[in-house]
Image (tube, rainbow, N blue to C red):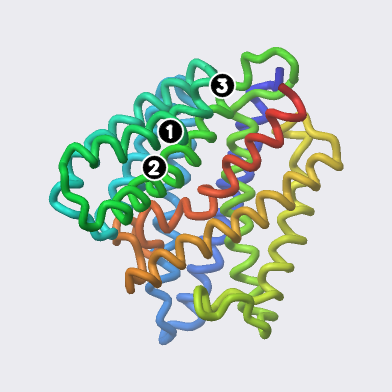
Amino acid sequence: MLPESNITIALSGIWGILLIASTIVWLMQVLQPKKNLTELIQRTKSWWIMIGIFTFALLTHRIVSYIFLGFISFLALKEYFSIIPTRRVDRSVLFWAYITIPIQFYLAGIAWYGMFIIFIPVYMFLFIPFRLVLSQQTEGFLKSVGTIQWGLMITVFALSHMAFLLALQNQGKSINTGAGLLLFLVFLTQFNDVAQYTAGKLFGKHKIIPLVSPKKTWEGFIGGLIVTTLFSVAIYPLLTPFTVWTAMAAGCIISIAGFIGDVTISAIKRDLVIKDTSSLIPGHGGILDRVDSLTFAAPLFFHLVYYLYY
């Protein structure tokens, strides 16, 4: 089993990176006092809070970790329902959508893979249209079913795979702990966002999907992919049971899936003509804006690990 000290070392490294980034922002304020750095300062302050909460949740009791991840899922689902158009009769169904969160995360916590993997995409996907039928309101029925099911898929089902990573430590066929795998996933996903953004700013010329996300470029995407994969290879011995080739595959999957998750949420926001899903996190938008990459990266990374080691 992976020593807990490795988790502490990795978290210390993350705090060190944040300290360096904060120092650079402070120097920019001193050297360029007339430049508007408000958003950058807000983002940096928010990262201190987010990393602090994540560190606490990861290093305390495992139940606290599950509650924290479930709460993130709840906030993401709440934001999703707050921005999509719904009918009055849909409100009773939204209650059942929220009820899926403790059930899904409980299934992850006890590592009941069979029920975990089908509870939402089978049972809830069948229950939701049935419950809407009972309202006897057929106008807008298909749109309501689709939007509610999609919200459950990305904010509860997809994100709950992070919780199941924590349960993998008791499976017995691998030397890793779930906390190490979760930290590996979350850090690389967020690191990839920053790497793609930075590479795009420095070298971006050729847009990928300008009608969905006009700031995304091929240079940013490829630059983020290369840097994230290399970083994955650099840190995998500390947090995972991977070989170097598995680490490369994981880095590529996290980078590509993270990009797809990002632009998918961007497509939703563009369809609804909004910039952010909320203003909960200063400089970042809402929870769903922050976990958009994880909605695709978390399940794909989980199933890579599950297939190879469990």
Q: Nearer the viewer, residue 56 or 29?
A: 56
Q: Nearer the viewer, residue 32 or 296?
A: 296
Under mark 3, the amino acid is Tyr
- Which residue matches tag 1? 120
The percent position of residue 31, horizontal first and vertical second, equals 51, 80
> Which residue is pictured at 19% across the width and 37% down the height?
134
- Which of the 4 quarters of the picture holds residue 33? bottom left
The percent position of residue 21, horizontal first and vertical second, equals 56, 61
Verify CB contact (< 8 Å) between mark 3 and mark 1.
no
Under mark 2, the amino acid is Leu
**Separation of residues labelled 2 and 1 (CA atoms):** 7 Å
Disc 2 crowd, CA 10 A, few/some/many (<14, 14-19, 20+): many
**Separation of residues labelled 3 and 1 (CA atoms):** 12 Å
> Which residue is pictured at 66% across the width and 80% down the height?
204
Mark 2 secondary-structure assignment:
helix
Mark 3 secondary-structure assignment:
helix
Say which mark, if any, is on residue 113.
3
Q: Is residue 133 left or right of residue 202?
A: left
**Quadrant in which the N terminus is drawn:** top right
Verify CB contact (< 8 Å) between mark 3 and mark 2.
no
Q: Is residue 187 left or right of residue 279?
A: right
**Separation of residues labelled 3 and 2 (CA atoms):** 18 Å
The percent position of residue 213, horizontal first and vertical second, equals 51, 74
Verify CB contact (< 8 Å) between mark 2 and mark 1.
yes
Q: Nearer the viewer, residue 224 or 108?
A: 108
> Which residue is pictured at 44% across the width and 42% down the height?
52
Mark 1 secondary-structure assignment:
helix
| Mark 2 or mark 1: whose residue is earlier in sequence | 1
